[in-house]
Image (cartoon, rainbow, N blue to C red):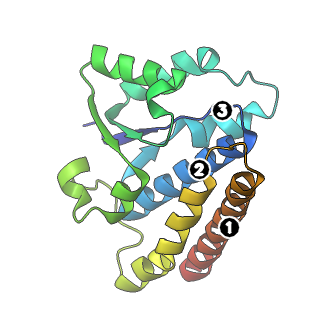
Amino acid sequence: MKELIYLAAPYKHDNKATELLRFEMVNKVGAHLLGLGYYIYSPLSHCRPMAHYGLPKDFAFFKSFDEHMLSLSHLLLILKLPGWDISVGVKGELEYANKNKLKTILMTFNDIFEHEDLELVLGPTPADPRLQTQADRNIFNQDYEELIHAVESALIEPGTSSDLELMRIQGYIKCQQLISQFTTLKIRNNS
């Protein structure tokens, strides 16, 4: 039985800070779901780091690899970040999923972290959960509201006002700081 969840999200954007934020958000979602015991594959998490070593960074290059990974998956989970509906990559993944009758679910960043019972949406976890104690969940979710606020601030599109641009940059920096704090707490807690 296939147990792999393919986690798709938009990536390409004119603003490189937005690309980095999308990368960090999909990694946070992937880590959260893996911690709950789901088997997750994210092409963005997996392929973006390798693209720094001379590989093309467009969907056309990765399409056959992505389709192979989709064929190994039982579910396409699309992270509904701003721009998901116009993303060339997400459109290609969704087209493959529809053509091959692969179950597809769309969820926002907040949905994934706030859903009462993800098993009703994603199915039962196939893996032994690594973060099942209440203490682990508390550490992972502490300051969550602050993270959401920082992410929302970081996603403000640049406007004509320098104040909006400053808010976007400050939100992005705060988001990066919080992600680093969560990562440090997770490593310390798992040691």
Residue underneath mark 2: 155
Residue furthest to the bottom in view is 135
Question: Relative to 139, is 94 above or below?
Answer: above
Where residue 88 sits in the image (x, y, percent)?
A: 53, 21
Describe residue 100's horizontal placement relative to residue 183 as left or right: left
Quarter of image, res 103: top left
Q: Which residue is mark 1?
A: 174
What is the crowding at mark 1: few (fewer than 14 residues within 10 Å), some, or many (at least 20)? some
Q: Earlier in the sequence, mark 3 or mark 2?
A: 3
Please tell me whether residue 42 is drawn above or below residue 185 in the rendered image.
above
Alpha carbons under labels 2 and 1: distance apart: 12 Å
Report helix, strand or loop for mark 1. Answer: helix
Mark 2 Cα shell of 10 Å, populated few (<14), some (14-19), many (≥20) = some
- The numbered mark, 2 or 1, whose residue comes first in the sequence reads 2
- The relative height of residue 91 versus residue 163 in the rendered view (above or below) is above
Residues 104 and 155: in front is 155
Residue 179, visible in the rendered structure: yes
In percent of the image, x 45 and y 75: which residue is there? 141
Number of numbered discs:
3
Numbered disc 2: secondary structure: loop
Disc 1 vs disc 3: Cβ atoms closer than 8 Å? no
Identify residue type, mark 3: His
Is 95 or 154 nearer to us in this picture? Answer: 154
Question: Residue at coordinates 36% horizontally, 41% vertically from top-left?
Answer: 4
For mark 3, what is the residue? 13
Q: Position of residue 179 (x, y in %)?
A: 62, 66
List x then y, in percent, for residue 127: 34, 57
Residue visible at 42% across and 82% down in the picture: 138
Q: Which kind of residue does numbered mark 1 sit on?
A: Lys
